[in-house]
Amino acid sequence: MTKAFEPLKLIPAAEARRIMLETPAVGVETVALRDAGGRVLAQALAAPEDLPRAPRAVMDGYAVRAADVAAASAEAPAELGVVGVVPMGGVYSGTVGPGQAVGISTGGFLPDGADTVVMIEFTTEAGGRVHIGKAAPSQANVIQRGEDLAAGAPVLARGRRLRPQDLAALATFGVARVVVHRRPRIAVLSTGNELCDPEQAPGPGQVRDVNQYVLGSEVEAAGGAVTYGGVVPDDATALHDTIARLLPQHDGLILSGGSSVGVKDISGVVLAGLDPPGVLFHGIDIRPGKPTIFARVGDKPVLGMPGFPTSSMIVFDGFVRPMLWRMGGELGRDPWPCAARARLTGAYASPAGREDYVRVRLTPRDGELWADPLPGGSSSISNVIYADGLVRVDAARERIAGGDWVDVMLY
Ligand code: AMP
Ligand code: MG
């Protein structure tokens, strides 16, 4: 049985976010290390052993006993016998005794007996002897066993999207096969009798389909794998059949258009006929983006996004992207990551009791960053294109004074 719902009975933004973030993560797969960058780690990594495994030189020079060079200076160099070198990819098999030195390169494992490395710059070698013109304390130019990462140290948390530098940990500890979350497979489709493809010249009353491309690109940027489901006319059977065809092969579906309650707005009706739990809300108390429908078929989210491109982009920013991160297994990611603080250039009036989103352009002036709200409502796309970021204004806030500081989520 599909849960009954009331179309466009607005729920608060926080409630909509809570419901959407309950969408569970998709399953895992194993990928080669070279394919792991940008993927979400599904198993925590703790250091399986000390790194480095043994003391190593961090400079080119000579491995010696610190006591032998304690009194060395440029005027009175210490003279030691060179008894060998540490080969790269091997170790010096002997022990460095008193009066002895062993050549060593950066990264070479420190031979037994030696406790310090003298930089090559302070040495001159001739005829099997080396003159050392500078004292070196014990353990100089040496990285100790476990100094970088001690065995057992937490290195990478589960649910972390792997950055290039994170692969250093996987590679160095020999994790050649990496368990990551699958990319959520999301089908995106547009609805509307008025829509034509971008390569077509719009006839009278037609507009080119924008949302499929914007939302598809957003899905990929959020770590998903997108299927372009095409344009579906305002026809309940056609929409129902398209959803029925796409949903089994995907983890979720995003459609746009027809999400309000007009005669041509069939998304609500079609989504209401989906399998349980079905529609969980229809309408969020936000601006823009109010006519947003969220349904779930089992674990799979089905979203009815507003038709206006700017509205659907903002609903994506505020609600869908964090849900996709969660579906992709990212645990700790801030759903609304603000990366800049700026001062608003002028006063801004926000609708009472409704969360709203202001597209702003950022300009540095007098050592501060200024956020200039861009003109145009949800029917314009220029404001999102010109914007550097988005300011979310809490439902309770009705006015921001010119000069007030705001948090900006950067595009
Ligand atoms: P709707 O939500 O279907 O009532 O559409 C609201 C407005 O957004 C209408 O002007 C539509 O033509 C426009 N619209 C809907 N879907 C798209 C789309 N995929 N690309 C561009 N504009 C759209
Ligand atoms: Mg429409």
Image: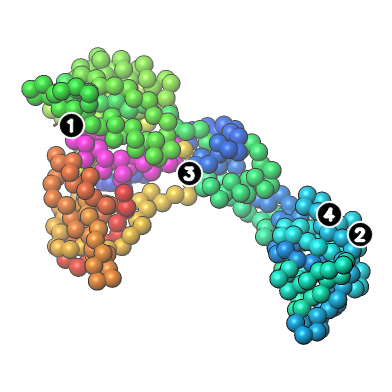
What's drawn in magenta, residue-wise?
A: 304-327
Distance between the alpha carbons at the discs numbered 2 and 3 = 50 Å
Quarter of the image that includes the N terminus? top left
Q: Earlier in the sequence, mark 1 or mark 3?
A: 1
Q: Which structural element holds mark 1?
A: loop
Distance between the alpha carbons at the discs numbered 4 and 2 = 9 Å
Classed neighbour count for the residue bearing mark 3: other residues with Cα under 10 Å, few (<14), some (14–19), many (≥20): many
Q: Nearer the viewer, residue 16 or 226?
A: 226
| Residue 247 appears left or right of 290 | right
In percent of width and height, residue 339 lies at: 36, 57
In percent of width and height, residue 165 lies at: 55, 50
User: CB of residue at label 2: within 8 Å of ligand 1?
Assistant: no
| Residue 170 appears left or right of 238 | right
User: CB of residue at label 1: within 8 Å of ligand 1?
Assistant: yes
Q: Amino acid at mark 2?
A: Gly
Which residue is tagged 3? Answer: 330
Which residue is tagged 2? Answer: 94
Q: Amino acid at mark 3?
A: Glu
Q: Earlier in the sequence, mark 1 or mark 4?
A: 4
Which residue is tagged 4? Answer: 91
Q: Is residue 1 above or below residue 311?
A: above
| Residue 256 in view, yes or no | yes
Mark 1 touches mark 2? (CB < 8 Å): no
Q: Is residue 177 above or below residue 203?
A: below
Q: Which structural element holds mark 3?
A: loop
